[in-house]
Structure formats: structure tokens, C-alpha cells
Image: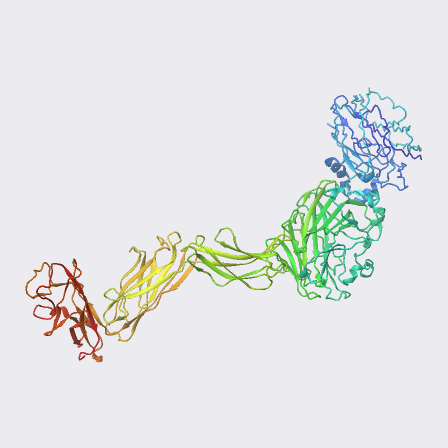
Amino acid sequence: MRKIVISILVFVLVFSELSVSLAETIMGDLTESEIECEEQLESDGQENLATECKGPESENGEAPTTEDKEQPENENGEAPTTEGEKESEIENGEAPITEEEEKRESGDEENLANACERQLEYETEENLVIEGEEQLETEDEENLAIDCEEEEEPEIEENLEVDCEEEFYIEGEELVAEEEEQLESNIEEELVAEEEEQLESNIEEELVAEEEEQLESNIEEELVAEEEEQLESNIEEELVTEGEEQEELDSEEKSAPKCIRRVASPRVGYYGIPIKQVGEIGKIDFSKLDDSPNELDGFTQMSTNAGLELPTRESHQGRAYYMSFGYINNFRTRNSLKDMSSYHKYGDDWGRPLPSMDRKLSDFVAYYRDAHIQVQNFAVATALSEDYNPDQYNGVVTYYYQAGRNSQIFKSSVLEIAYGDQENDTARKQSDFMPILKLYKNEKTHELVAYAAVLDSYDNPSYVEGYLKIKMSLTNERRGRINVSMKFLNLTTRYNYTNIGYSVHMDIAQRHQDSKMYSLGNNKGLYFHETNMRDGQDYYLYFFYKGYANHPAAMRATNNPDISPFTGGHSYDPLFFYTLNAPSTPDPGKNVMYPYTVHPAWALRWEPERQRPDTVREVNLEIAVSNRPDVPGEVKLDNDGEYTDKGYRITGTWNNQEAEADYVELYYKVDDGEPQKFAHKENPSVNTDESWGYTIPIKEVKKGLDHEISVYAVTVYLEDDVKLQSNTETIKIRPELTIEEQVLGADGKVTTGVAPGETLKYEILVDSGYIPDDKGTYAQFTISQKYDPHLESPTDLKVIDENGKKIGTATYNVNEIVATLNTNPKVLRSTKVKFTFNAKVKEGAAEEDFVVSQATATGKYSTGDEVKQTSNEVKTKISGVLKFVSAPGVIGFGEKLKISSRTKTYQLIQFDESLSVKDSRALSRNPSWRMTAKLVKPLTGKKNKDSTLDGLYYRYGGNVSTLTENTSALVYKKKTTGKEEINISNAWTPKGDGLYLEVPAGTAKADAYDGTVQWILQNVPVNE
């Protein structure tokens, strides 16, 4: 066998129905092979068939593979298997993978056909495959190809055009896409269109093998001519070999257009890229995973795996926190983290060497797998406080089962990439082996970046399914919050959809079953709170679902975590996600614990996405670890506040809990208004109650309306722009309902005593306190009062408003009297309500007893507020009462009197009311009384204020007394012998008792005079 090692080589495959006129080799850059692409014109009655400018193709239009033997096609266009054919070898002497071996790896014959379909669908010209008479090699051993055998369909060759789409670079596996050029376009630069005529051949099953032509280059570069071996064909088809000239076919031929392309290693494949094709780790191109070419500026590449220590706040009290990858044994001492060889002792990944950059990936992954650091096991590790002996075991805390040493036995603590054909598909395949290839750190920006290969299996991996970049960044130093960015570059064409899942089988500091899981509420995330760790401090761990880009879409929790995030199970499976878009476990509510205490575990998934080959998708997760959560301040109110002339006064205290706070602000809010800041305190003291007070302007809290006032404090941290809100204290201002009761006597005035047989009038007044601007109504409202047994049945019951309009009804039973407001129509609660009734004291009521009354208003407003208020208590004493029944308000001596030259007497001729007294006191007490009269104001002229008249007298029982401002006249005296009314004015006659006026001669002047007389009733013994 002859080997041919050339820098440039071109195949031209000749189909049985096609004819190619010319194949040339183009000399160029020895590192970038150039290929002619030839155009074949339609035969009579058929449409154009075209070949892609990707490299040699088989007769069925597929790219040939380096894995297969060269075989001519049979009648149906498939390559038959012939015996005695030899496989080409790559330069290192290793035999390429055969199609049969590849089929055995997949275990799915159906997928072999789908491979080419997906490559064509995604137009991935990176999967260069070479098949034909002989498998060739370039000088780059990484240029291996994947067999992509496609079944020929009857009309598959219609409407195909010449494709000149992409070019590939061998070095660095870089793919450079060029524009597709069509045969019909008039290209002036790179292509010279030449016509081809299709052979007028009806030859059946004729296979014209390609002719190879190797040109010797005049350039003094590497061209080594080696022997060529032409494979023999066992089928009866015409074999045309290449030589200096191609044999003339039966039909007329024209020169083919030329498309110069550069050959390179494939970028994607059905299963991915063969590991042996990748080459040295240091030459792997991860650029598609980076945000920019300069993203790693300022980073240091690490040769050993170690966590990146994070800055800590004073309140962490000596603890240290690390972003890290791989397993960390929680039995470690704190000081062991300084020893980069300690992974030998603890059997974990801290300090484990990373692969050298000149090592081939195939050699690295073939090494014992425990030597690989798994990128999917990222974590935030906690080194306990130095107060806990730093050389004492169990000094490190993570959260992976068991004791931080997650293994393949417990696959529930993993990050996995799942594949499927639809959004709701089960996970057809999940990633297994993702070793870190490169690790970078930036101690200034606190970032840790890992690049890893996603391999098809743990045991004897054959393909790279993609590359994964995980970047851990500190986003909030004070709160210890970390963003984990996960970017996946897909290199397979096997499935349409990908999703990413992350699950953790919890074991915080070996408190496996005690690792209690709580909800942050409203699907915001979950957290763990472990008290009294070995250093005496608490431990808080948070996983946030929302509040950042590319956050998780669903969460599930379980007690049976011995599985991957995507279970591939059924909808009734209680484990993790049974499809790529399975729903979440219901959120139990804020600070409520999930009921998983046997093997507490949980998983997150993101949204499934249709991910084309050679594309990148990104998901994110945010984590925080602390010894305590941020503690908000506390606000207290002294009372419910009160109205003043200027507004509503509120007072209280606030207490700041955080020493690192820059300032505290106090806010109030009235009803649905905007919060208003009313206090600001720089450098607040810690754990000290500080008083505050503020008067809210009256225009914001109008009296007589409902209001709700909220008061809270905000603790501000300028460094990380965090505002932590305290508790909220609320005041509900409701106008105060008042109810007042009064008892009136027969004279309509308030009385405190009553005699048996007398009638009392009751008035109960209710004022809700609301003003007419309020539109609320009374929903249910009653005024009730216990009915006193000293009273006879009430009369004249009324329920009215301030205008006398009836707005309710009243009922009475022997024990209670009740007024009920109308509900149809409804009564506005701003209405003032009056409930009145009359009640007579029973004749047999015992003296010295009291008639007691007290009303209660009870009800509900249309706003739902309930009200209940009790009136004042009124006591009316039952006893004999000495009192005026009536007294004259006007007394007259006549009008148009003549002035006499002599002394003249004028008799009383008119009065409007009788002068009557009643004494109902018990006769056993020998009551007696008397009445006197006194001149309060002398008779004075209305015109002439200086003119007065003396001489007002009162005659009683034959005795005459003068009424002056200084002396009183006896009007009447009586020793009570009964309870009848005494009408004193009945005895007022010209000859009898009563008042009269005597005017001396010469003292009267023409004028009108008036004055005031005061009647005085006294409870005195008659002998006084």
C-alpha cells in the first residue's frame, strides 16, 4: 500500500447520472488546503444537482467519513460493504473508527440516518467527512471526521444548488463561515461559471468513481509524494481514475466553476467531537463561551484547585468563606485549607492539580476519574471561626451529601445538561462527566472561572458533547451573595432541545436529616438555617430563584434524592423533574419549612430551549451564605396618636440593629398616598431605643374621615445600595362614636329627681363622628337600654335624625327598649341619631330609690368596621320634691297711666303664669316651706335711665312688705299636709294678697318703667 501525504488534495466523485469535466488542485497556503468545487449542470429533463464545497462527497450527496472504508455505491445509492478493502490510517498509525464500531457505540441504528438529516438541517458544514476510493489524511491529526451516512430517497436530488458556504481552519478548530454562492449568480471574483451538460446517458447503476490527481507544487514547501493505492471495487461499475487528464465521457462536458475553501476539523457532530480529535487542552478554543476577548484580563490561571476567599464583614466573627469547585471534605480542619497537598489525606479536590495545557484531552480523561475535578460541584464553603480550634476536625462546612464528598453513587447533588426532542420530552440523555480543564481567579473582582468538557460518559468517554463555563462572581460583599453563571456550548446534533438542572442532596456540616429547608415565599427561593454550629454561630444558606437574569423556572423537593435532576419518570413520580418542563413543587409560604426530613433534597431547572449545534445558552443561579441574615430595625408607637390643632400627632421609638448601617430613615404613609420621609439619622447607634415624634399635617388626615397611617424605618447601606425595611406599625384612625343620654322633667329641663307619678322624658343622642364628606352608611345599628322597673310602659317612642325625620323603629319589652336604624334606605353614618321616649314613674315607687338609665350603641358600618359604645349613666332619684310648678314671667300694672298730683296706688292687673309650688316630700318628715320675693332690678324708665320708681309692695295675710334690692318680702309659707299643687297667685286680688305699686306724688315722670322680681322657694321650718 502506498501512502500519500499531501498539503492539498481534491476528490471529485462522479455519480452514475452525472459527469464532471475537470478536477484541479489549487496550490496555496500549506496550512490551509484549498478545494475546487465543481458544478454539474442538469441533464435533459432533470433539475440541477450540486455538490457542497466542503470536501469530497459520496455519491448520495453525503460527506464521506474518515471512519469508513471507501466503497462504491450500489444501485440504490448506498455504499455496499465489500470484503478485502483496506482502511486508511491516520498519521499516528491508529486505525480510524469504523462505521460498525460507531453503530455499536450508539446502540441505535435509526439514529445513524438521522445524523445526516440533522447536519443538513442545521447546515453544519463542520462535520467534514471523507469517503470514496481511499481515506486521506492531512498533516493535522485533529482533522478526524464523523461518518454521516444518509439513505438515498427517490427525489432527494431535486433543486439542489452548488453550496460554497463555509471554510474551516485546522488550527484551533476555528470555524469561519463564508457566504453561500449559487450557480446562477454572476460572480465576478472568485468563481468562473462554466456550463456543464448532463450526459445523455441512460446507463443504469453506472458508478463512475472519482479520479484523484495529485499535483506537485513548485513551491519549496512540504510535499512528500507517497504511494497511492487504488481500492478495488467488487461491483460491476465503471471506475474512472484520475490522471493527467480525465477520460472523456459520452456526453459533451464543460469546465466546472471553482470555489476555493479551506479544510479544517469539524466543530460539531451527531455525538459531538471525538475526544481523540481534540488534541491538547491548552489549544481548545473556549472563546464562544466568553463575553469578550478581554474577559479574562486581570485573571490568573491556576495550576491547582483551591477556593477563592471572599471578603467578610465584621459580623461574621472570624469565619472565612470561599467560592470553590469540586468536593470538599467537611472533616477537614480550617488550617488544612492552606495545605495544597491535603487532598491526599482527605480524599477531596482541594489542592488537587489541574491538567497541564500540553496534555491531550484523550489522555487526560483516560486517567483515573477520581483525579478529575467535577465542574458541576460548585459551592460556597465556610471555614468555621478561628475561635473553634483551627486544627480541629470538622472545621469546614458545605452542603453536599455526604459531608461535602458528593459521588456518583449519590447523583442527586449535581449540575446536569439534559437533552430531548421536544420541550415536554423526558430527558433522553443527561450529561455525565464534566472535568475542569482550565481554572482562573481574579482576587480583585472576586471571580472564579472554570472551563470544562462535557463528555458522553464516565467510563471510556469517546465524545465531547460540548463545553461548559461556570463563572462564580461576588455580587454583594456585605450580604455574601454570589452569582453563578453557567454557559453551555452544544457540539451535538443528536437532539433538538437542551435544559439544565441543578440538584442538591442536603448535608450541612453532617446534619443531614436536620438540614431544614424553608421557603422565602412567593417562589422567590429557599433557605436553610442551622443554629449553634461548632463555632457557636448560626449558619444561613440561601438559594434565590428570582431577581436576576436567566433565573431558574421551577423547583422540586423530595425525600428520595438518589437520582439526577431530571428523572425521566412519570407525572406521578414524587422525585425530581420527570420532563424537561415539569412543574414546581408548591411553595408552602414564607418561612414555612418543607416537609422533607429523611433525605432532604431539592432540584432546580431552567426553561428548555431549542439549542442548535455550535451555539451557547446561559443560565444563572444566585447563592448567599452568612452567619445571620440582615436584621431590620424596629419601630414602635407609643399610642394611636391624637388630633391637635395642626394635625395628627404620632410618637414612638426606633431601634437600629446593624452596626454597619450608614443611616436610618423614618417614613409614614397616609391611606394610599406616597410614603413621606420625616426623619433621617446618620451613623445610628446600635440596639438603643431612640424617640421620635411627628405631626402629620391636618390636610392629609382630615378629621371626621377614615384614615390609615403606616410608620416604618429603612436602614440604608451605601456600599451595596441596600435598603432594609423594618416592621410596619399601623394606626387606623376612625372617628369616635359618642352616645349621650339625658333625662328631662315635666318642664323640659334636665332633672335629677322625680316624684312618684311624675313623667320623665328620655333623650339618647348618637353621633358617629363622621362628616358629610364620608359616604359610608350604617349596615346594622341598634340603640338599646335596660328598662328600669320603677317606670311604667314607655310612650311616644321615636327614632329620628337631627331634622326630625324618622330613620328607624323602636320596640319595647318588659326588660329592654331597643331602637333599630333602617337599612332600606340606608342611613348615612354621618347622620346624627336621636332616640326619645317618655316614661312615668310608678305611683308606688319607693322614695330614695333611683331610676337608672344607660344606653348602648352597637353595630357595623358598610366599610366592615364594627362599633360599640356605651352612654353615660343617668340616675334620677325618686323622692318628695319641693319645687316650682310654674312662675309668672311677666307682671303688669297697666299701660297709659295718668300721673297724679297725689300719692297713687296701682294694683296688679296681669301676669302670664301662675305662681305654683308642689311639695311631694314624705309627710312623715314634716316638710314645710316658704316663699319670698326680692327686687333684683328697680323699676327704671326706658327713656330716662335715671328715673326710677320706688314703692313696690307685697301684701300677705294682712302684712305688707316693701320689695327692694336689699330686703325680701314674705310671699307665702306652708306646712305640707298633702302632695297637691299650691297656687299662690290664686289669692292675688286688690283686697287680698299680692303685689301692688304705690307712687308718691311728684315722683312719676312720663315714661315706661320695668324691673325684675325674683321668687325664692325655701325648705325651712315654718316657725323661722
Which residue occupies the foreground of this view, 75 or 586?
586
Q: Residue 464's quadrant in the figure?
A: top right
Left or right for 723, reference 133: left
Question: Which quadrant is the N terminus positioned in?
Answer: top right
Left or right for 887, reference 906: right
Tell me residue 18's x, y (percent): 80, 25
Which residue occupies the foreground of this view, 391 or 878?
391
Tell me residue 471's x, y (percent): 73, 49
Left or right for 670, reference 613: left
Tell me residue 494's x, y (percent): 74, 42
* Image label count: 0
Residue at the farthest top position = 252
Question: Which quadrant is the C terminus positioned in?
Answer: bottom left
Q: Residue at x 92, y 35 (%)?
A: 3
Above or below, 408 against 688 in this view is above
Which residue occupies the foreground of this view, 462 or 868?
868
Left or right for 721, reference 194: left
Q: Is residue 65 in view from this perspective?
A: yes
Q: Residue at x 16, y 66 (%)?
A: 914
Which residue occupies the foreground of this view, 698 or 158?
698
* Colour option used: rainbow
Q: Residue 15's quadrant in the figure?
A: top right
Tell me residue 664's x, y (percent): 58, 57
Q: Is residue 601 in view from this perspective?
A: no
